[in-house]
Image (cartoon, rainbow, N blue to C red):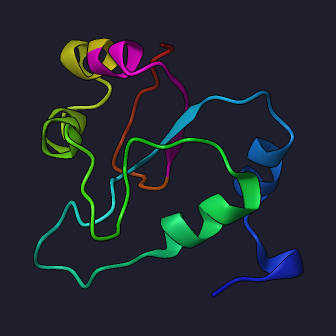
Amino acid sequence: MPVWNEIPEYARWLRTQPPGVVLELPMMASDPAAPLDLTTQYLSTYHWQATPDGYSGFNPSRRGEIAYEMQAFPGERAIRLLQALDVRYVVLRDTHIRQMAWI
């Protein structure tokens, strides 16, 4: 796991931003065939922003809906859902997304 200078720039940047909800895409465990990677949860302890994604003994109530809609990001329905969830920051960690949308 990254520490100190290895922490990604976006996590350090988020630490300096006003409080807001952060969603990282692709969402954790969005590919059931892939091993579970908890790096995004670990890195959230560096910026302490809220997130609608999570991993523990508790699954946020709308996590399945969010994951489903985010498969079409930056589609209109995905953007509307992010607005409804008051998401302020979206972190894109996958290069397959070719266009950007502002929410």
Report the side of 37 relative to 44 (left or right).
left
Report the side of 9 relative to 79 (left or right).
right
The structure residue drawn at horizontal position 24% and vertical position 12%, both measured from the top left corner, is 76
Up-down relation of residue 61 to residue 96 (above or below): above
Task: Residue 28 in the image: state x and y as whole percent.
Answer: 33, 62
Q: Nearer the viewer, residue 87 or 92?
A: 87
Up-down relation of residue 1 to residue 93 (above or below): below
User: Which residues are the magenta region?
Assistant: 81-92
Q: Nearer the viewer, residue 56 or 26?
A: 56
Report the side of 1 relative to 46 (left or right).
left
> Toward which corner of the image does residue 38 lie, by quadrant?
bottom left
The structure residue drawn at horizontal position 48% and vertical position 55%, both measured from the top left corner, is 93
The structure residue drawn at horizontal position 20% and vertical position 37%, both measured from the top left corner, is 62
Task: Residue 43 in the image: state x and y as whole percent.
Answer: 63, 66
Up-down relation of residue 5 to residue 68 (above or below): below
The structure residue drawn at horizontal position 48% and vertical position 13%, both measured from the top left corner, is 103
Of all residues, the one furthest to the front in this rendering is: 57
> Toward which corner of the image does residue 55 lie, by quadrant?
bottom left
